[in-house]
Image (tube, rainbow, N blue to C red):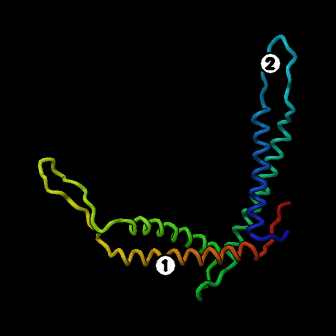
Amino acid sequence: MKMTSAYANKLANQLNDEKNYWREKERSSQTYTASLDEEPVIPDYDYRQVADEIGKIDWKICRIKHAINQANVVNTIDLDGETLTIDMVLVRMAQLNNRRDVLDSMRKRLPKTRTGSMHLRSSTPEYTYLNYDLDQVKADYDKVCDSIMKLQIALDRYNQTVEFEVDID
């Protein structure tokens, strides 16, 4: 069956929802409580059926995720004259997101902040100063954000348009 990465991920999520249904059915039906002087109300539960259903769903999810991973290793995106596999794009986006977080924290700092005195007897205030060029950090932050946006747009386009084979049966 041919599908896009976006569809395959949605299908995997749908299957996870179905598996959660069976897990909840199992959790709520595997035991019952009854008084000695009453007729027990035994929930409709067949262990073998539930275990088999969960196993089938897990196998389908495994095959879908494998197909996505294979497609991510084989398919490429051309970005600014460079060819990247999808798995490289995903790794690069994670790296850039981490860097953006660091730069975001750095760009929000004041050039000079009062930190107090290290010695209780001293009345001389102490200050913390930035040891970097704030304008350079702000410029790098903007570049990283721009790179993330370009990668995300290219990845979105790939996820919505490139089809690959998924064998879930």
| The residue positioned farthest toward the bottom in the image shown | 81
Out of 116 and 161, give the one closest to the viewer.
Answer: 116
Closer to the eye: label 2 or 1: 1
Q: Is residue 24 above or below residue 78?
A: above
| Residue on which the image places disc 2 | 34
**Mark 2 surroundings within 10 Å by alpha-carbon count, few (fewer than 14), some (14 through 19), many (20 or more):** few
Tag 1: amino acid: Lys
Question: Circle 2 sits in a helix, a strand or a loop, which is it?
Answer: loop
| Residue visible at 61% across and 84% down in the picture | 79
Q: Hey, which quadrant is residue 154 in on the image?
A: bottom right
Q: Looking at the picture, how far across and down is residue 13, in whole percent?
A: 74, 56
Residue at 86% in and 41% down: 49
- Disc on res. 143: 1
Mark 1 neighbour class, 10 Å CA radius: few under 14, some 14 to 19, many 20 or more: few
Q: Nearer the viewer, residue 35 or 68?
A: 35
The quarter of the rendered structure image containing the N terminus is bottom right
Residue at image point 75% right, 52% down: 16
Tell me: 89 left or right of 65: left
Numbered badge on residue 125 = none
Amino acid of disc 2: Ala
Q: Relative to the observer, which residue lies in front, 149 or 61?
A: 149
Q: Quadrant of residue 41?
A: top right
The answer to which image quadrant residue 52 occupies is top right
